[in-house]
Image (cartoon, grey):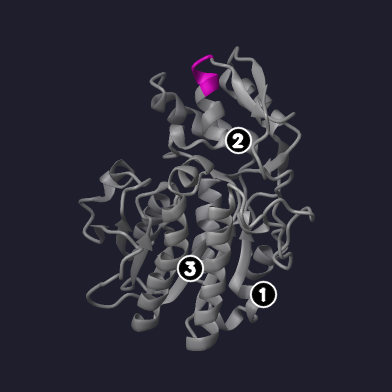
Amino acid sequence: MTAADRVLITGGAGFLGSHLCERLLAEGYEVLCLDSLLTGRVVNVQHLRDHPRFTFLQGDVTQPIEIDGPVHYVLQFASPASPKDYAQYPIHTLQVGAAGTYHALELANRKGAVILLASSSEVYGDPRENPQSEEYWGYVNPVGPRSVYDEAKRYAEAITMAYHRAHRVPVRIARIFNTYGPRMRLEDGRALPTMMAQALLGEPLTVYGDGSQTRSFCYVSDLVDGLFKFLTLDGSSQGGQDGNILNLGNPEEVTIHQLAQEIIRTTNSRSRIVFRPLPEDDPKVRRPDIRRASRFLGWQPRVSLAEGLKLVTPYFSAAVGKG
């Protein structure tokens, strides 16, 4: 990658996409941010709009992507990404994973670009292996309520590897585990922003099931650092498929009940915890095996959950009107 390179980020006005826009601009690259604004928000990139190397393009990746001039890197980050979002937009979620990834790959193929696909730990479904390594094939219900997202990501991985094998498109597939930080939408239905808002407002924190299900939470700056290292990894050092597919996340595993307790402590809230029925197909465990990312990228997350919650509390306080 050189400072003259152009990068297209689909879903660039989303939570992760906007942080990637910032990082790539800071590194000296020209950034094209494409977003339909279905779940992304203009406010996430508003502070970048006057940057001379930033361009915002409103468009839907389910339609062909036409970009004039060179494109050196394509980051396919477009997709509804929370259970609430893909329950509201189930067909569009599948279309983005299938047609959207196809159009991103077609663009990469035409331009001779590297493509980085934002896949997900959801490809592992409700895993029977913990932690989850890249070799694990997953345990997914293909027709359950979560399948629209799980199968969209699994298909996206399949077509990405097909382009790699058939057209020699250089690809990176990042299986991203739970990530949090500023710019998360309070209303997106994910556990951490929901609980943070509840704690700051003094409302009961909602825990589904008995709270024994586990998750691993990665602070956004750590995740973006891993993605940047992956994107700029020298292709000659990738080592075949092993280097094409990497888990990125924080292996610090906590139960959802522990998360609720930590949020209450961090926010000095007097909220209590209430329990609700567990949603169908909700994964029992989620923890990344990141040995492959450590080997290929020299990457390890640095921010602990306790530290990250302290860092993000001012953002959530402002978002709920308490800051």
Element type at mark 1: helix
Q: Which mark is residue 116?
A: 3
| Mark 1 Cα shell of 10 Å, populated few (<14), some (14-19), many (≥20) | few
- The residue that label 1 is drawn on is 242
Q: Is residue 279 above or below residue 160?
A: above
Position of residue 134 measured from the top left corner of the image (x, y, whole percent)? 69, 65
Q: Which mark is residue 307?
A: 2
Tell me what residue is drawn at x 23 percent, y 50 percent.
Answer: 49
- The quarter of the rendered structure image containing the N terminus is bottom left
Q: Is residue 111 visible?
A: yes
Q: Nearer the viewer, residue 150 or 188?
A: 150
Q: Is residue 185 above or below residue 143?
A: above
Tell me what residue is drawn at x 51 percent, y 47 percent.
Answer: 220
Position of residue 187 measured from the top left corner of the image (x, y, whole percent)? 44, 33
Magenta segment boundaries in residue numbering: 198-202
- Hey, what amino acid is under mark 3? Leu
